[in-house]
Image (tube, grey):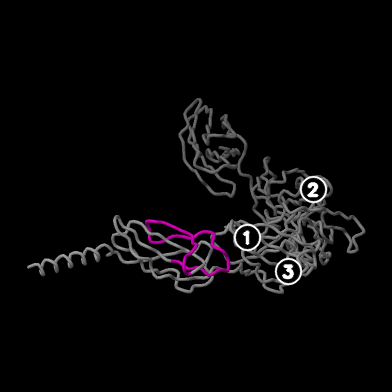
Amino acid sequence: MKKIFTTLVCLFMFFGVFSANTMFAPALTTPTNGAVNQMPNTFLKWSAVPGAFTYKIQVSTDSLFVTSNQYSTNLTAIYSSNLSFNSKYFWRVKAIGISDSSAWSAARNFYTINTVTITQPVDFSVNRPVSCYFKWNAISGIANYEYQMDTSLTFSSPLFVSNLISATKTDAYSKQLAFGEHYYLRMRALHSQGTSNWSSLVNFTTLTDFMLRRPSSDTNKVMVVTKLEWDWAGSTHYTYTIATDSLFTTNVVSHLIDTTKVIKNAYDTLVRVHTDTLRFGQKYFWKVRAENALSTSNQTAVWKFTTIDKMTLLTPTNGSIGVTTIPTFKWDTLRQSIGHYVLELDTNLLFSNPHIYVLSNDTNFYSIVAPLLPHTKYYWRMKATTLLDATNWSDVFNFTTTSPIGIENFENNDVSIYPNPTVTGEINIQISSSELNDVSVRIINMVGQEIFNQNYGIKIGSNTINLDLNKNTNGIYFIQLKQGDTIITRKIIVNK
């Protein structure tokens, strides 16, 4: 009996000791053992342990973990912080429960990243803008990047430039560089505990020449206020010069442009500016030079263009017949680069006694108010003006009018149409009649389309017909009233 009791006590003690350390150690999963190019905030992950409420993590540069970074979490992953660059690290994890803990896991090691990898520009690239665009592979867990550019391998020349860049970026434009110089670029990463090594050097050469883009050389019919475009050279300033001769000795105008006019990104970089008002029908020569505080580029090639010399008429088309006696004239707009348009209309090809209409620069059509003579051949022409100049007269167009739309009054009736213009779309037609009659009311738009047609009975005395044009677009319309063989036409304006 005593022997049995002793055996039971021993078994109890054995299982008690065994049960005191039943929690198993975590299995490390990420990064893999021996992983390279890990970030200063390396992501560490392990398998979950049943019964564990927290985990203790050690990260050290020695395999015995004599000194280490200590982390604690109730998750199964953490990010390390501020690890040294280009270093070998060991790490392990322990699971901790309410009254128990596991042994340390088997240790793994990894190597932190050495430095930044520059991806653009390509080594030995040429013709780079003097604000050089460059890119690099991201490094997480840092405070900043630093770049240096210089024409000297010792990075100590007067052309040396350097700057810090946000840790969230992977591309940037450099400070201003000199034109036509061979530069070296290097980068490194920084955080509060240190810096990476400098990257490998990237060689590149800045440009001395760049291209004009628009208007293309020998372009004709250019507007007198035209947009000039050329390649962005990376410079802070540009001087463009325009003259009326290729040697730039006559009517020379130069303008210094700063980079607030620049539209740039990594793929399409252009400078866009508008000229002063030029003269009509004049050939111009132009060129551009880039400049900054360090140096200047070469002048671009000289391009030339000729400004528009006359307008283009559209309608009534030349030689058209059967044109309404209240026609609408249309032309190709010169936009708002001009002061105003002048339209001349005459029954004489020599325009010896023309009707002259001065029209706004923001329109490309004009409708006659007073009806023209029926069955009559008319000639019309136009020109545009600025404060400096005027175009030549356009080509002369002619057209022949048709029959009159109607006569101006009923024989015994008094007709009034109001309000005109209408700002609500509502129109009232008031007719005074001495007898009973029927009147046809027809409304026609500017292109001759009928939009309304209805008959009304007219009693003796005053009659009012109410029309609603609210659903029609703003513009000019014609109301035609017909009684028997008698027709009158009134123009109305809808301006809601």
Pointer 1 residue: 145
Dot placed on the residue nearer the N-terminal end, 3 or 1: 1
Q: Which residues are magenta?
A: 63-91
Q: In the shown orientation, is residue 419 left or right of residue 59?
A: right
Q: Earlier in the sequence, mark 3 or mark 2?
A: 3
Q: Quadrant of residue 408?
A: top right
Question: Label 3: how many residues lie within 10 Å, few (<14), some (14-19) or many (20+)?
Answer: many
Q: How far from the left and from the top, in percent, is residue 181?
A: 79, 68
- Separation of disc 3 and disc 1 at Cα? 17 Å
Write down the residue under mark 2: 385
Q: What is the C-alpha distance between the residues marked 1 and 2? A: 57 Å
Mark 1 residue type: Tyr
Of helix, strand and loop, which one carries label 2? Answer: strand
Residue 412 seen: no
Looking at the rendered structure, the kind of residue marked 2 is: Thr
Does the magenta portion include 86? yes
Residue 90 place in picture, x, y as percent: 47, 68
How far across and how far down the image is residue 452, in percent? 49, 43
Identify residue for label 3: 184
Q: Is residue 412 above or below residue 283?
A: above
